[in-house]
Amino acid sequence: MQQHEHAELVSLLDLAMKIPTKGETAVHDFIVELFKCLDYVYRIRVARTGVDIPFNICGEVRDTKTDVCLVDRLQNDIILLVQEDKRPEDTESTDAQAQLVAEAVADFTQNNVNRDALGLPPLAEKVIPGIVMVGTMPTFFKIPITQTLETHIAFGIYPPDETVVTYCYPPFLALIVKG
């Protein structure tokens, strides 16, 4: 059984490394299968794709849509966000990073709504883990969200305190092919 899972993971890795001429990449499928193989997914934790999360920004309610996320089913909380950078030819993935941060703020808000429904007090702050994928290369993020930041974003007011998002990416070798 485990050999089949690993074979599927390797097949999806191969597909995810290919840039399609049209349509979606296989990165989302690869991430979901990777989470399964690493035992991130089990009875109370599921990997989901395309989850809509309401996002309050500048007095309007918008929707953010996760590429992939891990959901804790006990509290219905999203505990990890994954965003694919769909523009791998660009050197800066600022759009994917900004989208990941927006999803983290929306996730924080929704998690507090879920906590309220369970009779639990809202969290004043939380660090939301996230990953931006460029093809199969991850960059890992720790995104600190506070109720103050959430409120300021909801009303379109510049927050009084700086929010520092930290990130880490694995070293890799750039291969130069001379032909």
Image (cartoon, grey):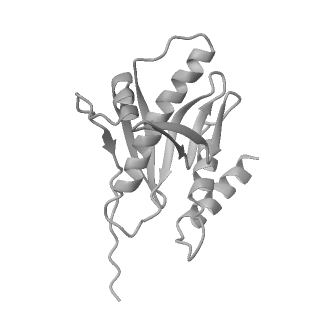
Q: Nearer the viewer, residue 94 or 132?
A: 94
Residue 113 drawn at (x, y percent): 56, 22
Q: Nearer the viewer, residue 85 or 152?
A: 152
Residue 68 drawn at (x, y percent): 57, 46
Which residue sits at x=34%, y=30%?
152
Q: Quadrant of residue 48?
A: top right
Q: Compared to 150, does 62 lie above or below?
A: below
Q: Is residue 70 visible?
A: yes
Q: Nearer the viewer, residue 65 or 47?
A: 65
Q: Nearer the viewer, residue 161 or 134?
A: 161
Q: Is residue 158 left or right of residue 47?
A: left
Which residue sits at x=64%, y=62%?
11
Q: Compared to 173, does 44 lie above or below?
A: above
Q: Residue furthest right?
A: 1
How many numbered marks appear?
0
Which residue sits at x=31%, y=64%?
91
Residue 93 drawn at (x, y percent): 36, 57
Which residue sits at x=52%, y=71%?
19
Q: Is residue 156 left or right of residue 111?
A: left
